[in-house]
Amino acid sequence: MHSQRGTAAAIGGGTPRKGEAGEHSSVLGAKVVLFLSTFINKVDRKGRVSVPAPFRAALAGQVFNGIVAFRSYRQAAIEGCGIDRMARLSDSIDELELFSEARDDLASTIFADAHQLPFDGEGRVILPPLLAEHAGITEMAAFIGRGATFQIWEPDAFATHQDEARARTRAHGATLRLRRPDE
Amino acid sequence: MHSQRGTAAAIGGGTPRKGEAGEHSSVLGAKVVLFLSTFINKVDRKGRVSVPAPFRAALAGQVFNGIVAFRSYRQAAIEGCGIDRMARLSDSIDELELFSEARDDLASTIFADAHQLPFDGEGRVILPPLLAEHAGITEMAAFIGRGATFQIWEPDAFATHQDEARARTRAHGATLRLRRPDE
DNA sequence: CATAAAAACCCATGCTATCCCATGCACTCC
DNA sequence: GGAGTGCATGGGATAGCATGGGTTTTTATG
């Protein structure tokens, strides 16, 4: 198996233009960050991986030029998102009782484990060994779009996981109510 | 285990705004102070430790060039943050009933115990013995990002703590409603 | 006021993450 | 159908950062 290309993906700045597009604040609110599709890229001997261009486009314009990654606590995968999401998370946590246990736990679980991975000139990031190990990634890394966030898996592991998920979904037919635009 | 590098973290960028408190979430103004990830650095024989570069970057531009540290009263750790946050904390405490017991306790627990640790030319600080002892730090110090603040632990002690926190979080599925961007 | 200890200041060093340039495939546009 | 461009990939050069240790200035002490 190898890299699949051009399968469209994230929605960044309206037109398929890539440049740095940039405008974060669309007139009515937040910039749309959407990660779609799956991309499998190679991890070179320096530990670098190219973040799929569409994902990069979705992240364009955020305060930090790169991704934030941390170990998923349910799966053997790496969770990824942009810095803006973390900032929002921080705000949310700040609203919890100042020295409460819940707050402590969340902070140690999420922020302590989060790594900021800056893009190099070519849009690659270095996967910290700790994260790579947790996901069992060595040669290849699969970037999985999940809407507002994405995950990074060892390709084969993900394939297995996906099959299972699909089977489960078919089993109890998961449903979802669509949010109204202004809700 | 030893020092992990480059996992970048905080965002300093913005304007060297100094004021106090303020706004955390203006659209594109406010400086974003976010401490992420974990960095383990060595404490040299003079008691000096390098504050991770990304953390320094997050603190850049504040009125006091260094960090503020005090003993965590729930854990064997040192709480750390920038001087700006202390100002905000002061405001919060000011809102408590004047002369109330809680106010008294907080004031003496936090402010009386707080140390201002200035950076030296290389971005290091000296850990006051009192604090180091409380956290059981001797050789190495782990800087733990917690969003708006950070903590300093003895590496092994933190590893244990993190495992427990992780387990607890997974257990009662601690969830947190994410704030909407404009909320 | 003199002396010792501690803190602030400086300069040096090694590692590695970051920057920069080069290559080749694949899809797209003309 | 041919050439151009976007994007993933490699590898070498450079600068940032953690770390050590010496020297001067400040603070505490007798």
Image (cartoon, coloured by chain):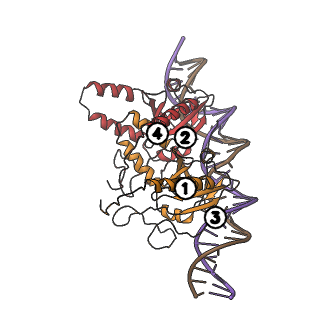
Chain colours: A orange, B red, C brown, D purple
The chain to which mark 3 is attached is A
* Residue beneath disc 1: A162
Say whether residue B70 is left or right of residue A97.
right
The chain to which mark 2 is attached is B
Say whether residue B170 is left or right of residue B90.
right
Q: Nearer the viewer, mark 2 or mark 1?
A: 1
Q: Nearer the viewer, residue B29 or D1?
A: D1
Q: Residues within 10 Å of mark 1 (few under 14, many from 20)?
A: few
* CA gap, disc 4 and disc 2: 20 Å
Q: Label 1's element?
A: helix
Q: Residues within 10 Å of mark 3 (few under 14, many from 20)?
A: few
The answer to whether the residues at label 3 and label 1 have Cβ atoms under 8 Å apart is no
Residue depicted at x 49% and y 29% = B77
Q: Nearer the viewer, mark 4 or mark 2?
A: 4
Q: Is residue C18 above or below residue B74?
A: below
Amino acid identity at mark 4: Arg
* Residue beneath disc 2: B38
Amino acid identity at mark 1: Gln
- The N terminus of chain B - image quarter: top right
Residue C22, by quadrant, is bottom right
* Residue beneath disc 3: A3
Q: Is residue A37 above or below residue B181?
A: below
Q: Label 2's element?
A: strand
Q: Label 3's element?
A: loop
* Residue beneath disc 4: B170
The answer to whether the residues at label 2 and label 1 have Cβ atoms under 8 Å apart is no
Q: Residues within 10 Å of mark 4 (few under 14, many from 20)?
A: some
